[in-house]
Amino acid sequence: MNSGLGSAFLGDRAHHMSIRGHPSFHAAHVTSPPTSPPPRPATIDPITSLNLRIKWIEALVLGLKGAPESKSVEASSSRDLFHRAEEIQAKLNDALETNESCRKFIKNYNQYAHLLSPTAAISPVGSSEIPTYDTMPDQEFETLLAELEPDIRAADRDLREIDALDSKGVSAAGKLPEHEALKARLQALEVASQQDLDMYERIEARISSTLQSYASHVTIMSELFVSWNDLLAEAEDRVEQLEKAKEESGLVFFEE
């Protein structure tokens, strides 16, 4: 046994040939090369995807901005993600307060998620086809029609009013040069109207002065009537006293 082991380690040719002729040797060594695994699709980190979404919303709300002038400006403008999200939320709330349609749209965000999610943020290798009304589910399409019904009815009503005005010739489309001949008449009417306004102002001033004079006269007459009433009352009292004195003096004369 030791000679066999020694011959194997020392390179015994017969021993090596016997080992190579064994079936297990061919099964272990004569195999096909391993196949490479299929390439995995490219993915985006969740933080990167969130940053892309935030930048996309910033571009919609604030508009696109130019590149920074220097790295120092870029470093100073970079702030915490939480604070930036709060600022964007506040600006979105301010925009939604003044826009009823946009507020309804954001309220039903889940129904329009395919319109608000950029393709790059979902999958960089995904399809870039934009969903259309033909591919929209029936429930979402009915919801969209129900929300657009007031706007459609208002637009139809406005179009009917425009058609009615056009049929009456109110709009006078294409007849603007014909109004040039009426400018002189319009200017004369403006001058006459201004003169009438001046005259009305003078008349109003005279009427106001007359009313004030009338009010002062009425006050004076009221005071005179009160004075005359007092004088007449005093005169009546005096006459009554004199008559009583006269009657008393006559009775005394007859008694004597």
Image: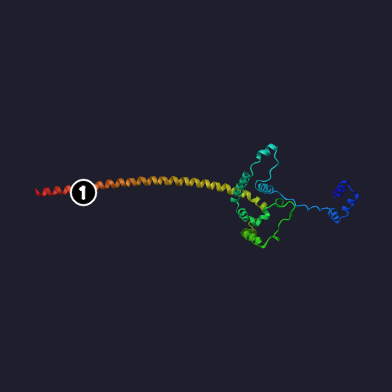
Q: Residue at x 88, y 46 (%)?
A: 10
Res 100 quadrant in image? bottom right
* Percent position of residue 81, x then y: 64, 44
* Percent position of residue 35, x then y: 81, 53
In the rendered structure, the answer to whether residue 196 lies left or right of residue 169 reads: left
Q: From the viewer's side, name the closer residue of 249 and 77.
A: 77
In the rendered structure, the answer to whether residue 133 lies left or right of residue 253 reads: right
Report the amino acid beneath label 1: Glu
Q: From the viewer's side, name the closer residue of 232 and 39.
A: 39
* Percent position of residue 173, x then y: 67, 55
- Judged from this view, the residue extending furthest toward the left is 256
Q: Looking at the image, is 223 positioned above or below residue 109?
A: above
Evaluate whether residue 212 shows in this view.
yes
* Percent position of residue 222, x then y: 34, 47
Res 25 quadrant in image? bottom right
Q: From the viewer's side, name the closer residue of 168 and 11.
A: 11
Disc 1: which residue: 240
Q: From the viewer's side, name the closer residue of 160 and 185.
A: 160
Evaluate whether residue 164 shows in this view.
no
Q: Residue at x 49, y 45 (%)?
A: 202
Q: How is the image coloured?
A: rainbow
State the SS at label 1: helix
Res 168 quadrant in image? bottom right
